[in-house]
Amino acid sequence: MKNNKSVDIDLGGIEEGLRPSLLLHCCCAPCAAGCIERFTERFDVTAFYYNPNITDIEEREKRFAELKRLMDEFGVETIDGGDGDFEGLVKGLGSEPEGGSRCALCFKMRLERTAREAKRYDYFATTLTLSPLKNARLINDIGAEAAKKEGSVYIRTDLKKRGGVLRSSELCKKYSLYRQNYCGCVYSRRKD
């Protein structure tokens, strides 16, 4: 199944009738809600929560608990990927605007870690492309590069398309999911 290249779920890159394994990097329950049905239709999914950018422990745990609660509803195993040195990674970049070089480094940190974990799976993807505030092309390029570096296979997506954001809103209401109002790091919490 491994072919060391990126595929695009929207282009039908997965052979019909197969149920390959997928490690889905999840940033939060609302983003996962917008795509979990699409992924579980075609894959045996494992949710991978790895977000060292969330340095507020209470917030980090709250987001993980909400993700786990949602994934339990879909019968999907959830793994907590642990911590990382986000603050060391972005030192000196606090004044960067949202979506700038600090965010690109954060995406890279998270997707490289996911790509390493994904070696035990057929594919990996991320929920990060669901957010209308995030650059899906940048995220996909970073994911594909991480896959190449680690020897895993990344699925390019733009999950905000084809009703992803609307479905996220519907499932957030249905399951009364906690919806945070910032990406996760202390810098995304401030008003620019």
Image (cartoon, rainbow, N blue to C red):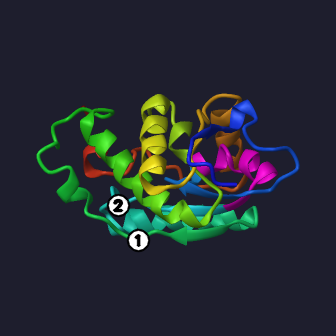
Q: Is residue 23 visible?
A: yes
Above or below residue 178? Residue 77 is below
Q: Quadrant of the N terminus?
A: bottom right
Question: Mark 1 near mark 2, Cβ–Cβ under 8 Å?
Answer: yes
The circle drawn on residue 82 is 1
Q: CA distance from mark 1 to mark 2?
A: 7 Å
Q: Position of residue 100 (x, y in %)?
A: 28, 32
The kind of residue on which mark 1 rests is Gly
- 4 inside magenta stretch: no
Residue 157 occupies which quadrant of the picture? top right
Q: Position of residue 149 (x, y in %)?
A: 41, 51
Prevailing SS of the magenta stretch? helix
Above or below residue 180? Residue 117 is below
> Which residue appears farthest toward the right when viewing the image?
17
Q: Which residue is located at x 57 percent, y 50 percent?
A: 153
Q: Which residue is denoted by mark 2 in the rendering?
A: 52
Q: Quadrant of the C terminus?
A: top left
Q: Position of residue 164 (x, y in %)?
A: 66, 36
The kind of residue on which mark 2 rests is Pro
